[in-house]
Amino acid sequence: MPAPMAAAMFVSDVAIHGWDLARATGQSYRCDPDVAESTYRFVVDMAEQGRQMGIYAAPVPVADGAPAFERALARSGRDPDGSHRYPTDRHRAVGRGDQGPRNCD
């Protein structure tokens, strides 16, 4: 894997899972604008492969003009504002390689 791709993957992973952790613990999360833009570009480039691997769920709709990090979250299958209803059998899928998605509540 080329170093720039590995770096983008690492930064995106930390940013998205940082948001996951903040949300799960009832805290706010602010993402640096440059990190948000990099995360969005990475998720756009890798979303389909991520869904095939069970790492990302189906994209969630977001408002037109949403900030880059909200668009990245939505592309990864996360709901930035909590308004999306998830199907009961795939609530916030989290990847498990070839084992398929699992539910995390």
Image (cartoon, helix red, strand yellow):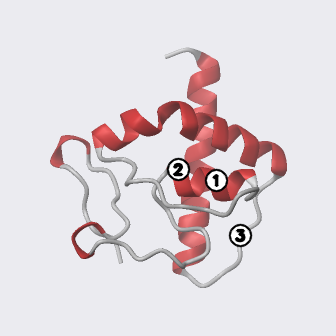
Q: Nearer the viewer, residue 84 or 96?
A: 84
For residue 71, the mark is 1
**Numbered disc in front, either 2 or 3:** 2
Q: Name, please, the residue furthest toward the bottom.
A: 26
Q: Which mark is residue 32?
A: none
Going from N to C along the chain, the mark reached first, 2 or 3, is 3
Q: Residue 23, image x and y in percent?
A: 57, 76
Q: Indicate the secondary structure of the residue bearing disc 2.
A: helix
Left or right, 66 with reference to 43: right
Q: Which disc, if any, is residue 29? A: 3
Q: Give me the residue at 65% from left, 43% from top.
A: 40
Task: Give the vertical position of 77 relative to 1 (above or below).
Answer: below
Element class at badge 1? helix
Q: Amino acid at mark 2?
A: Arg
* Pointer 2 residue: 75
- Label 3 secondary element: loop
**CB atoms at circles 1 and 2 under 8 Å apart?**
yes
Q: Earlier in the sequence, mark 1 or mark 3?
A: 3
* Amino acid type, residue under disc 3 in the picture: Tyr
Quarter of image, res 41: top right
Seen in the picture, residue 21 relative to 66 is either above or below; the reply is: below
Q: CA distance from mark 1 to mark 2?
A: 6 Å
Q: Which residue is at the far left? A: 99
Give the residue at the far right of this rendering. 33
Crowding at dot 3, Cα within 10 Å, few <14 / some 14-19 / many 20+, comes out as: few
Q: Residue at x 36, y 47 (%)?
A: 55
